[in-house]
Amino acid sequence: MDAQTESPTDVVFTGARLITLSGGDREPRRGSRLLELGIVDRGWMLVRDGRISELGEGDAPSFPATTQIVHADGRVVMPALVDCHTHACFAGDRSDEFEARLAGADYLEILAAGGGIMSTVRSIREAPEELLVESLLGRLERMARLGTGTVEVKSGYGLDPESELKMLRAITTAARRTPQIVVPTFLGAHALDADAKDPAAAVERIIDEALPEAAASFPGIACDAYCEEGAWTLADCRRLFERASELGCPIRVHTDQFNSLGMTRLAVEMGARSVDHLEASTPEDLQAVAASRTIGVLLPVSGFTLDERYANGRELVDLGAAIALASNFNPGSAPSPSVPFAMALACRKCGLRPAEAISAATWNAACVLGLQDEIGSLEPGKRADVIMLDTSDERDLGLEVAGPGPDRVMIAGHWSAGSARG
C-alpha cells in the first residue's frame, strides 16, 4: 500500500505560524511549560531530504527554482501528531457489543460474559497474518490523513504466545510498508483468556513464554498490561513487570480505568514509562504520578464511548505531572483513529487548555515512546513530520470537533496521500 506521494527534495513553508515546541531540555513538559509552544509568527521552514533543515522568522531566504514553495498565508504549521496509545491492529467486528451497551450493559459485564476483548481475540486467532498487515495499513493511512505521523500499536488480542507473536510480526511488517513511524508494544496481559482450559496456566505462559519471546524478537519493546477487576491482578502485573525489567523492556500499564487497585502507585515505584487511563485514580494516585518521572496518558475517547468518566487532566497538570494524550483507537471502547478528536475531548472533559493538549499530543507523546530526539517538535535535524492546519489559530485544534483533518500532511518529507497539493 502506497501511503505517500512524491515530493521534491526541498520544500519550504513561508508565511507560517510555526508551532515549534522547541527549546529547553529533552524531558516531558510539566505544569506551565505545557503552555510553551515555541511560536514563531511569520515563520519559514526548509525541509530537505526528509528532514527539517532550517527555520526562522520573517522573510525566507532565496532558494533554488526547484524548491517547492508552500505559502502558508498565516496558517499554523506544526509537528505531526504522535499517537502513543492505540490498539489499531485488530480483526472482526464489535457492533453487537456497541448495541449491548446502548441497551444498558457495561464494559466489565460484557468482558465477563466472554465478549469485548475476547471477541476480537477469537477473530485475531483465526485471521491470516497478511490480513492483519493489510487492515492495519488501511487504518494507518486514515490516521495519517488526520495528522498522525507516529503511531504506537499494541498486541493484546492474541492472549497466547503464538497469537501475540503473530500480531507483533504483523505490526512490524506494516511498519516497513508505511512512511509513518510505527512502534510495537507487547500487551499479552490485556485480558484473561476466557477460552483457556486453565486460566492460571495461561497467565504463566504470557509471563514465562510470550514475554521472553517478544523481548528476544523485538529488542527494547515495551511491555504493557491491563490491571483491572476481571482482568490481570495487581500481583500478576507485578510479576510480569519484574520479568520485563529483567529482559530490558520498558514498562507501561493500563490502570485505574474503572477501579483504583493500587497499580498506579506500584507502576510509579517500578519506574514505569507511562500509566494510561487514570479515570478512577484517587488523589493519592495522581500525586504519586506528579512526583515521579512516569507520564500519565489521558484517553478521553474511552470515556466518551463508555461511561462519561474522564481522567482529571487539570489536577494532574496543576500538581506538576507530565501528561500525554492519545486516541486509544480500538474496535470496542474507542472506535476512533482521530487524535484531534481526543484533543477536543481533553479540552472539554479533562480540563486541558488547547496549548496543553497540543504539547500532550506531540512532544510529551514522543517522550512516552522515547522518540523525542526524532519527532514531536520542529527543530533542525528532526524528521520532517509536519502538518499545516486550515487555520491561523492553533486553539482550533481543541475547539473543532470531528473535523476533516489538516490541510496538508507531510511525513518524512513526503506529502501523505490525500494531502492538499499545489
Image (cartoon, grey):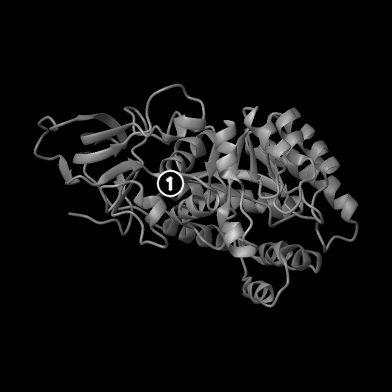
Q: Residue at x 63, y 31 (%)?
A: 290
Res 261 quadrant in image:
top right
Q: Nearer the viewer, residue 291 or 67?
A: 291
* Residue 411 seen: yes
The answer to whether residue 369 is seen in the rendering is no
In the rendered structure, which amino acid carries the disc numbered 1?
Answer: Gln
- Taking 284 as reference, is 320 left or right? left
- Quarter that holds the C terminus: bottom left
- Single out the residue that lies furthest toward the top: 25
Local secondary structure at mark 1? loop
Image quarter for residue 209? Answer: top right
Residue beneath the point at 89% across and 51% down: 200
Dot 1, crowdedness within 10 Å: few (<14), some or many (≥20)? many
Quarter of the image for residue 195 reads bottom right
Relative vertical location of residue 348 with respect to residue 376 in this rendering, above or below: below
- Tell me which residue sits at (55%, 36%) in the image: 317
Q: Position of residue 182 (x, y in %)?
A: 50, 45
Residue position for label 1: 180
Q: Is residue 315 above or below residue 269?
A: below
Q: Quadrant of the N terminus?
A: bottom left
Q: Position of residue 89 (x, y in %)?
A: 58, 57
Residue 358 x/y as whole percent: 43, 42
Q: x%, y% of residue 356?
A: 46, 40
